[in-house]
Amino acid sequence: MFRALRKSLSAKIAVSTTATLVILLGLASAYTGWVQRRTVVDLQTRTNEGFATFVYNTLLFSMVEGKMAELQKILENAVSTAGIEALRIVTPDGTVRYSGRPAEIGKKIEDPALERLVQSGAKTTGLLALRRAGHVTEAVPLHNQGVCTTCHASDPPYLGTILVGFDFSDFDAQLATIRNRQLGL
């Protein structure tokens, strides 16, 4: 009787230990994948913010110098860069004033989320971001400064927003492939 109980107990302990290890290993793998993805996304976010700030400074210089044709060319060249989905200068009412895609100039932004992002720029001075699956749009508000009065009146205080759209759909697909490989899928 003790022999059967001992065999039964040993088998139960072995099965429960194995099941526990499998569950813990799965959780550890999932957590590791999440941490890796979060780290990569954070690094990409910092890169985006740095690029958006660089674009702002470059475009601001062209605007201050009154070189609007140069400004338009910079936008068009930037959009031809891999990963840059869109680059626009938008007025507070949502009209595209300058764009990396000249066909957009003069048209209103039709995306309600981007419209809200442009409107939010009036209330903030820092970078704003809109994140969607595979896409990030960084918004740099343009507030009227002393140098702006060469082309703009001293009013209104908010002139619009620079929108920089990044496409990460390929990047997200690669992360999903790595995650699935780690999980054995």
Image (cartoon, rainbow, N blue to C red):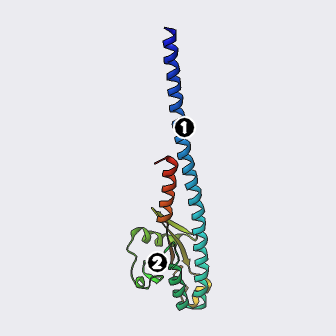
Circle 1: is it few (<14), some (14-19), or many (20+) Cα within 10 Å?
few
Marking on residue 54? none
Residue carrying label 1: 24
* Secondary element at tag 2: loop
Q: Are marks 1 and 2 in contact (CB under 8 Å)?
A: no
Q: Residue at x 60, y 82 (%)?
A: 58
Residue carrying label 2: 92
Circle 2: is it few (<14), some (14-19), or many (20+) Cα within 10 Å?
many
**Camera-side residue: 92 or 166?**
166
**Camera-side residue: 110 or 176?**
176
In primary-sequence order, the first of circles 1 and 2 is 1
Where residue 157 sits, quadrant-wise, is bottom right
Where residue 51 sits, quadrant-wise, is bottom right
Q: Residue furthest top?
A: 1
* Secondary element at tag 1: helix
Q: Taking 26 as reference, is 68 above or below it? A: below
User: Looking at the picture, how far across and down is residue 25, in whole percent?
Assistant: 55, 40
Question: What is the three-letter code of the residue carrying label 2?
Answer: Pro
Query: Alpha carbon of mark 1 to alpha carbon of mark 2: how far?
Result: 52 Å
Q: Residue at x 50, y 22 (%)?
A: 11
**Camera-side residue: 99 or 117?**
99
Indicate left or right for 109 with 144 as reference. Answer: left
Question: What is the three-letter code of the residue carrying label 1?
Answer: Leu
Q: Taking 28 as reference, is 148 above or below it? A: below
Q: Taking 154 as reference, is 169 above or below it? A: above
